[in-house]
Image (cartoon, helix red, strand yellow):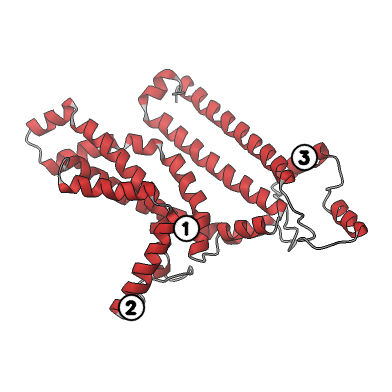
Amino acid sequence: MNSKLAMYILKRILYAVITVLALVTLTFFLMRLLPGDPFTGGKAVPPETMEALRAKYGLDKPLWEQYLIYVGNILQGDLGSSLKTQRPLTTTIGQAFPVSFELGMRALIFAFIIGILLGVVAAVKRGTAWDSTAMFIALIGVSVPSFIIGSLLQYFLALKLNGAVGFQLFAVMGWGPQNSKILPAFALAFGSMATVSRLMRTSMLDVLNQDYIMTAKAKGLSQKAVIWKHAVRNALMPVITVMGPLVAAVLTGAFVVENIFSIPGMGQYFVQCVQQNDYPMVAGVTIFYGSFLVLANLIVDILYGLIDPRVKLTGGKE
């Protein structure tokens, strides 16, 4: 690893740390601006009881002191506890995040495999019905929200198709057997799949016009070898660069999909906490997910720096 690439990686790590610190700060102060009261739920509470509750959770201290205590706790791995159940957020994350993570990984696999295939087919069959069909599917993915896709999948595949075949091919809700994990993962993947397919098509069209592709064809290589051994490998670079944003899109979109399909992941807890004005849980989940997404983007940036020779030459692509 040369010095310029090392400097590039160090800069990305520094940017990531600054981003997480900004996220913690904004989350802390924005939580204090939310309307409502997490203790009373809209009910009348004696002033003495309210003062005792505020003192118990440190809300009677000056705001700057609360902030310093909060940052100190986060640095020690303490994201806070629920005001409603007294349950530590780390316990909730330990139980719910693996479910959300599995859902997200399934969705990303669907998005990349199907998206790349659609993009390749659209580029190779440019101007044909295959191209139009692939891009129409991509247009639907870009235009239609995941909660509508999920509802349509539930109705047509989990209800209508199950009734037609006479057995439960797909589960309508829940998270357990394999047939309950296909529809929510596909609903979550649809938008990202559309992005990958459109990007892959554009990149493939550019690569197919390069001189080395013409040379490979002139040497007598089959179309299959030219496409999969030469064109696809080089066309994947732009797709790799959007992996970070796609991870963000998938994980944030999972909140909606998890509620539609009644999946016991982080999204379900997050929605409940927002409805209950459970400030520590809302802030903790926001910081956890934000940090996770920053880490995902950091990994993609580092991989890009290792793969793309232009980054090594310039010391970083800004």
Do callouts 3 and 1 mark residues in contact (Cβ within 8 Å)?
no
Q: Is residue 242 above or below residue 186?
A: above
Q: Position of residue 84 (x, y in %)?
A: 74, 62
**Mark 2 or mark 3, earlier in chain:** 3
Q: Does any portion of residue 175 appear in the rendered image?
A: yes
Q: Tell me the residue at 16%/43% (across/down).
A: 125
Given residues 38 and 1, the one toward you in this image is 38
In the image, which is nearer the foreground, mark 2 or mark 3? 2
Disc sitting over residue 67 in the figure: 3
Do callouts 2 and 3 mark residues in contact (Cβ within 8 Å)?
no
Q: Is residue 279 above or below residue 123?
A: below
**Mark 1 or mark 2, earlier in chain:** 1
- Mark 3 → mark 1, Cα distance in angstroms: 34 Å
Callout 3: 10 Å neighbours few (<14), some, many (20+)? Answer: some
Image quarter hosting the N terminus: top left
Do callouts 1 and 2 mark residues in contact (Cβ within 8 Å)?
no
Callout 2: 10 Å neighbours few (<14), some, many (20+)? Answer: few
Residue identified by numbered label 2: 163
Q: Tell me the residue at 15%/44% (across/down).
A: 128
Disc sitting over residue 102 in the figure: 1
In the image, which is nearer the foreground, mark 3 or mark 1? 3
Q: Amino acid at mark 3?
A: Tyr
Q: Tell me the residue at 88%/52% (across/down).
A: 55
Question: Residue farthest to the top?
Answer: 314
Question: Mark 1: which secondary structure?
Answer: helix
Callout 1: 10 Å neighbours few (<14), some, many (20+)? Answer: some
- Mark 2 → mark 3, Cα distance in angstroms: 56 Å
Q: Amino acid at mark 1?
A: Glu
